[in-house]
Amino acid sequence: MGRSSRNTQDSKSEILKSALEVIRRSGAPALTIDAVAEESGFSKGGVLYNFPTKDALITGMVEYLAKQFHGEVETARAEHLASKCPTLSAMIDVTEQWLRERQDVARAMLATKADKPDLSEPFKEVTTSLKKAVEAETDQRGKAWVIWSSLEGMHFSDAHCASVFTEEDLAAAFRELRRSVEEL
Amino acid sequence: MGRSSRNTQDSKSEILKSALEVIRRSGAPALTIDAVAEESGFSKGGVLYNFPTKDALITGMVEYLAKQFHGEVETARAEHLASKCPTLSAMIDVTEQWLRERQDVARAMLATKADKPDLSEPFKEVTTSLKKAVEAETDQRGKAWVIWSSLEGMHFSDAHCASVFTEEDLAAAFRELRRSVEEL
DNA sequence: TTGTCTGTACCGGCTGGACGGTATATTTAA
DNA sequence: TTAAATATACCGTCCAGCCGGTACAGACAA
């Protein structure tokens, strides 16, 4: 065991959360190892002990978020078993919630692009898996993909602070999304 | 013709095109002033003469692309005057075209935001203007915003190389988008 | 017509700071 | 005492921006 009662796993996730916090507060280009060190309370050496390179840190972030998103969708799915497409319904719920509470996913992806443009893999795994689930639940592909990409659009444009939607617009859009899922 | 026979406007757009080319070929992190200098044939000083800071260069790129997108939508709109919502129809066309022919541009757009997170302004102007046009053309807001954000989603996820759609999926989605515009 | 002067466009070496990563010291649980 | 875990000092590289220069075009005078 190490210096304190902490173990590496705890340290890792603390560091990851700090990294996300840095991005949320100051944007992707502010994600430096020094900034993460300061934010987390670890020293630079401590951060680098847990994530030997910056790439590892970024990959860790993407994996962390991807897992979390996937988990939340799985959970929400249980409440939509009556829906025409439970997975899509769940994704709508989770997306709306993430939009309102924490716009950090797409922003983390941006950090990815700033350093190494092809660290999207862990994220892609999750989306591929969700896509298969959707395909198993409906054969109205066109409609399903419109809903899907609409959700992606909301995520990304919000993360880019490029959304022109008002609260009211968003509400209307989500209402329509939920309606159209049941038309599948 | 001597050196000073060139005019600044031409130099500027040459440099902008080179910057886009650098990003297209090597990704966002490769966008350095030196790289743009080499690509364009200008010296570093020459680039900095036309764009006093890197931020100015990036802002220039975004403005350039935003204008181009807006222009193409305006043009395409003329061919959709019979549509329920000519602006949205035009945006669908232009988006599909950009997706297929020049994902480089979408990627560049995104890449710039990795460097300077608050570049949304020039882009936002264009989207705001388009949004007003859409609002004037339909009162089915919910449906319109779903279509809108779906287009954004396609743009962004492609730019992130995070799209899980096959060619066939995309085609189906666009077919559905065109169908649903006429349902407004 | 020629020489000087001024403004515009562009060149390229230099530097200071930031940042990723290393080397090494230090602390603590077992 | 040992090894995991964390701290600190430091190094090398990269890059934005600065700055002292050059090339050329037109204006204007003599």
Image: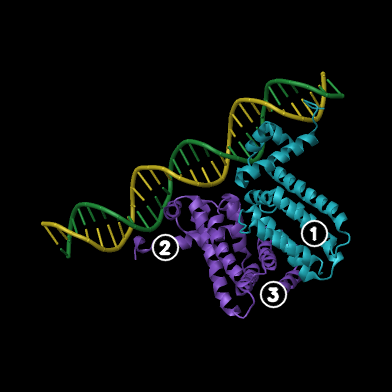
Chain colours: A cyan, B purple, C green, D yellow
> Residue B178: x and y, percent?
69, 75
Mark 1–mark 2 contact, CB under 8 Å? Answer: no
Q: Which residue sits furthest bottom? A: B82
> Residue B8: x and y, percent?
40, 61
Q: Is residue D16 above or below residue B103?
A: above
Q: Residues within 10 Å of mark 3 (few under 14, many from 20)?
A: some
Residue at the spot 47% in from the left edge and 59% down from the top edge: B41
Gap in angstroms between the C-alphas marked 1 and 2: 46 Å
Callout 2 secondary element: helix
Callout 1 secondary element: helix
Gap in angstroms between the C-alphas marked 1 and 3: 26 Å
Q: Residues within 10 Å of mark 2 (few under 14, many from 20)?
A: few
> Residue B140: x and y, percent?
67, 69
User: What chain does mark 2 sit on?
Assistant: B
Amino acid carrying label 2: it is Gln
Amino acid carrying label 1: it is Thr
Gap in angstroms between the C-alphas marked 3 and 2: 39 Å
Residue at the spot 71% in from the left edge and 32% down from the top edge: A46
Viewed as shown, does residue B23 lie left or right of A152? Answer: left
Q: Which residue is mark 1?
A: A128
* Residue B181: assigned label: none
Q: Residues within 10 Å of mark 1 (few under 14, many from 20)?
A: some
Q: Which residue is mark 2?
A: B9
Amino acid carrying label 3: it is Arg
Q: Nearer the viewer, residue B167 or B139?
A: B139
Q: Which residue is mark 3?
A: B178
User: What chain does mark 3 sit on?
Assistant: B
Viewed as shown, does residue A165 lie left or right of B125? Answer: right
Viewed as shown, does residue B112 lie left or right of B173? Answer: left
User: What chain does mark 1 sit on?
Assistant: A
